[in-house]
Image (tube, rainbow, N blue to C red):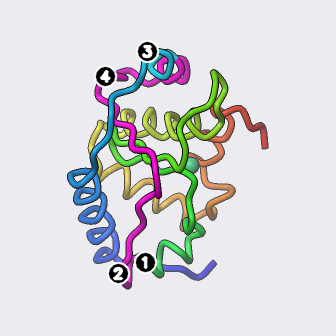
Amino acid sequence: MNTQISPQLVEAAIAWAEQTVQGSTGRPLTKEEATMAAKVGVKHTELIQICIGPVPMPQEDPLRTAVLNLGLGNPEGLAIGYSLFLKRGPKGQNDILFLHECAHLVQFGESGGRLRPFIEEYLGQLLKDGYLHSKWEVEARRMGGITF
Ligand SMILES: [Zn+2]
C-alpha cells in the first residue's frame, strides 16, 4: 500500500471527526445495550450516543480519497469518540457490529478519551498494516465475536 497520510490530512480527519460528532443527534444506550457495551469493556456507557442511519463519511477531497484508499469506504459502523454511528440498530445480545464499534470505544478510552491521539494511532495502524490486519481492527473483530 502506497497511501501516505500527511500531517495536513491528519488535521483534516480530526476536524471532520469533531464536526461530525458535534453535528450528530443520537440517543443514549438502552439498558441492554449498556450491558453489552460494559461486557466488551466500555467504562462510561452513559456517555455513549448511538446514531442509527447512514454512516457519515468525509465528502471532500483530499480526505475523502484518502479514506477510500485506506479501505474505509461504505462502512457499516463508525465510532468517533463516544458517538457510535451504525447503519442499523443492534439486534440481540451478540450483535457483531455493535460490539465491534464498542471495542473501538474502549480503544478510544485507552487513548486518553481524546480524539487526536485516537485518530493518529488508528490512521497510523491502517497505513502500516492495512485495514484488515491493523492492530485495533483485529482486536475489535475479536471482541465483536469474529475470530480471524
Ligand atoms: Zn473497526
Mark 3 surroundings within 10 Å by alpha-carbon count, few (fewer than 14), some (14 through 19), many (20 or more): few
Q: CA distance from mark 4 to mark 1?
A: 31 Å
Amino acid carrying label 1: it is Arg
Q: How far separated are the C-alphas under marks 3 and 2?
A: 37 Å
Question: Which of the image's four quarters has the C terminus?
Answer: top right
Residue density around tag 4, few if under 14, some if 14–19, many if 20 or more, within 10 Å: few
Disc 3 and disc 1: Cα gap in Å? 36 Å
| Residue that mark 1 sits on | 64
* Residue drawn at the location 37% of the way across and 58% of the way down: 120
**Tag 1–tag 2 contact (CB < 8 Å):** yes
Q: Position of residue 19 (x, y in %)?
A: 23, 60
Circle 3 — which element?
A: helix
Label 2 sits on a secondary structure element that is loop
At label 2, counting other C-alpha atoms closer than 10 Å, the crowd grade (few under 14, some 14-19, many 20 or more) is few
Residue 55 sits inside the magenta stretch: yes
Distance from label 1 to label 2 (Cα)? 5 Å
Residue at the spot of label 2: 60
Q: Earlier in the sequence, mark 3 or mark 1?
A: 3
